[in-house]
Image: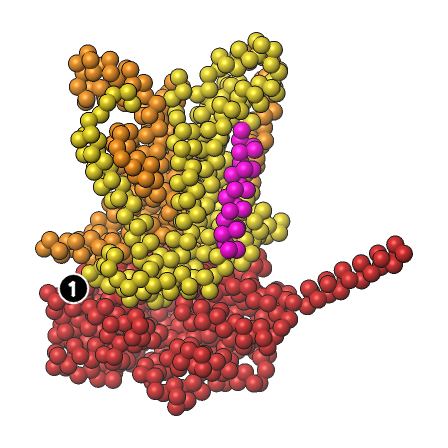
Amino acid sequence: MATAHSRSAARLMMSPAVILLLGWMIVPLSMTIYFSFLRYNLLSPGTEAWTGFDNYRYFLTDPAFFDALGNTLVLVLGVLVITVIGGILLGLLLDQPFFGQGIVRILVIAPFFVMPTVSALVWKNMFMNPVNGLFAYLATAVGLEPFDFLSHAPLASIILIVSWQWLPFATLILLTALQSLDQEQLEAAEMDGAGPVNRFTFIMLPHLGRAITVVILIQTIFLLSVFAEILVTTNGGPGTATTNLTYLVYVQSLLQFDVGGGSAGGIVAVILANIVAIFLMRMIGKNLDA
Amino acid sequence: MKRFANALLCASALSMLGTAALAEKLTIATVNNGDMIRMQKLGDDFTAKNPDIELEWVTLEENILRQRVTTDIATKGGQYDVMTIGTYEVPIWGKQGWLVSLNDLPASYDVDDLLPAIRGGLTVDGELYAAPFYGESSMVMYRTDLMEKAGMEMPEAPTWQFIREAAAAMTDKDAGIYGICLRGKAGWGENMAFLTATANSFGAKWFDMDWNAQFDSPEWKEALTFYIEMMNESGPPGAAGNGFNENLALFQTGKCGMWIDATVAASFVTNPTDSQVADKVGFALAPDNGLGKRGNWLWAWSLGIPAGTQKAESAKKFVEWATSKDYLALVAEKEGWANVPPGTRTSLYENPEYAKVPFAKMTLDSINAADPQNPTVDKVPYVGVQFVAIPEFQGIATAVGQQFSAALAGTTSIDDALANAQALTTREMKKAGYPK
Amino acid sequence: MARAVSNRRKLIVTLIAWTIGLAIFFPILWTFLTSFKTEAEAIASPPSLFLFDWTTENYAEVQSRSNYSLHFANSVIISLGSTLLGLLIAIPAAWSMAFVPGKHTKDILMWMLSTKMLPPVGVLIPIYLMFRDTGLLDTRMGLVLVLTLINLPIIVWMLYTYFKEIPVDILEAARMDGATLWSEIIYVLTPMAVPGIASTLLLNVILAWNEAFWTLNLTAAKAAPLTAFIASYSSPEGLFYAKLSAASTMAIAPILILGWFSQKQLVRGLTFGAVK
């Protein structure tokens, strides 16, 4: 099948994508690496000086660094768990016949279309505000004390907001995977006496394997760099409770205009993200080759 | 025949180029605050007087705007011809020579009419680097009806102790009334602006003359403890997430007894369209502790021109128009005196029409009480009342603000918050190479 | 679904599904409703759901203040432009990786995904400097280029996964019937690939439409898309929720409408592991 002719044609066809991405990666990346070895503050130009690994040392010994690392992982894992499980459940639900399927589907998909900044603002001010927000109102209506989401459960609140945004994506992919499931297999199992839970675990779940893998991979890439939601709601606080790695780099590069430090942080983030990706691929990569 | 037609074509093309070249486009970057939106809407007045200049507006939220203009001016991107910047940027950028000097504005501009404190904040080495669009300080806004109900009377220049007592007297948590609403949201321009100015009045300072961080000083501990205790006694829940807008919403819906914040808030809280308590608001100077410095700050949104722009002349014309006495009169005529951009010119405050605005006098007194060149009780190596005009301040203060916000939320103890603030400030200053 | 389902069961499922659907959609509904309230009403507590004085003043204000049509046009050009350019480059690449896989195909795919891992914030200054020097600042072309490059890995990935579904036997059969490479692509592959390409296109348009870092930092007045439009309504000093809601509704509406009409495409195309 893969003749020499088609192999060279294949390579030719791949080349524009590879060359462009290579250029995109190399040029800014090498500039970033270069900057990371300088002491370069945008607001004091002309004082750039070679400073070796100082920027890296500062970034890695920042007391917020380990918090940021932890927060990033918790955020990613939290959202993944909620969206994958929620996506499967919603997919199962939407797969059933009922009235108005099309409308409910668009209702469920809609959050994905909203700009992250806007979602965050709506959640923060209209819902989670302990004095004027909707949740507070509902709480007082049933006689409870309103809960201050963003001060006392900041990371959980952000996980909630981000999950709301990404649930549609997961649901969509998992729903369509479900819809392609062979009904006959399910019916045969049912006739063999398998209960719904068993049917789910042994037939549906493996079928969803590839879909779940793709959801996890793509979402992880985006979740590692969640930023707008944090900026709008908690500014990384209280303390460092919602500072993730991207936010830490932001504080360096765009608040302090410390290009050197920000670049070093960026490189550290890339390295760590790549480690996570390799890890992920090793764990679930085989699912892709069904 | 063909040559003639060609020549005609060329001539008309050139003439079109000529007219096109005459219409210069100014790109103006501004914040999306009410006064700037008003300026945008009144832009027709400028283009009518200067038909060869076209205005293009880029209106953004404050943080994003600051990011954009700073990136642009530092890399000489040339994207903007007029930038809206504040008293934080001007000293830093002026020193770098990034701004065009405005010392050559015509005499009709009457630069001596500018309020001295504001003008001082925008001048570096005798050169005026930005023209103030509106200025603000901070003051106490209080509910006259609640004060009366509590049986207390607000003096013109209260002390912090009085404020604390009044707040406790006005608080009625069951009715959802909180004696005092203050900023708690983390951010160098949010809670740290307030806390820095407040700390000044407690005798504290950010750095000593050798640029050592001062969070381990007893004055800072006193200031922070006072703030947190008062907020715990009389503040609203969730205060650690409340910035200017959140507190504004609380005050306007009648939930706050007092609110100490920017003087521009006065025009919002006395506006019957948005505020439920518009006719029940009184004003007083920001409190002090008798140490000679009050807790009020100073800020002016100003228009600056990046050095190296090709359109300096047109840009200057615009800057002159937007900050002139005529502009103030124009706003008064079209939108009423209460909406005139405050805090820039002495002549505004000498105008009897403007004196009728309830918050005019207190705004002026507050601005005059602030001294950015000598913000603290002790001598300090920096300028700025509620900020320190060094580039590193934004990042450091945001991190410190996070610590203090956590202390307010109760997730960190006051001592830990101060210790963390001290550690991270020292670390960042060392990294930036201070003292220098 | 071959089985007959009882009406009673259908009704119960309808109830559950609609409740959950509305719950998820609620924040958007709330934004839409708030856009018709006055600013004072928007922050009032207790919050009102439908019974308030409906007003269109916010939309009027937004229309008079901002140039919606310019921002909208920019968003359309940038999203469509970057997606089409991305597809142009990605289709051949994904094709070759799916049908002529080499030893390193997996690694190349992973590497492509890894180019998305550098936080944009860390690389802003180098890109800004490059754009300044090449005159690409505040141009739609510049934004199209950047968005193409950042979304290219996703496009390649999705197309690759979809192309892998296409049964190789059909291609073999076509080849044995004497079809050349070109006709193989045009007559056999493309019809089967269209659903996948369509859904990748839609997903990418959405991602590009909402991209709020590069679109804010590399534009000024001329090329600013709807993300900048929104940023001019968020968090000024003063009450803004009603106006922001109006602006958001105007920004989301096109994309929601697009999503509604292309539901089938989105759903059909994403059939991973499906075509048997």
Placement of A86 over or under A133, stated as above or below: above
Label 1 marks a residue whose chain is: B
Q: Which residue is mark 1?
A: B232
A90 relative to A59 in the view: left or right = left
> Would residue B48 be seen by someone viewing this image from the given angle?
yes
- Choose between B402 and C108: the one closer to the eye: C108
Quarter of the image where the C terminus of chain A is located: top left
Residue C187 part of the magenta segment: no
In which quarter of the view is residue B106 placed? bottom right
Query: Which chain is painted in red?
Result: B
All told, the count of numbered labels is 1
- Choose between B406 and A260: the one closer to the eye: B406
Q: Position of residue B324 (x, y in %)?
A: 51, 80
Task: Check disc 1 and give the amino acid type.
Answer: Asn
Q: Residue at x 34, y 80 (%)?
A: B363
- Choose between C221 and B189: the one closer to the eye: C221
Q: Residue at x 52, y 64 (%)?
A: B57
- Choose between C120 and C24: the one closer to the eye: C24
Which residue lies most toward the top here? C176
Query: Which chain is painted in yellow?
Result: C
Quarter of the image where the N terminus of chain A is located: top right
Query: Which chain is painted in orange?
Result: A
Q: Residue at x 39, y 17 (%)?
A: C276
Placement of B246 over or under B281, stated as above or below: above
Q: Which residues are magenta?
A: C69-91
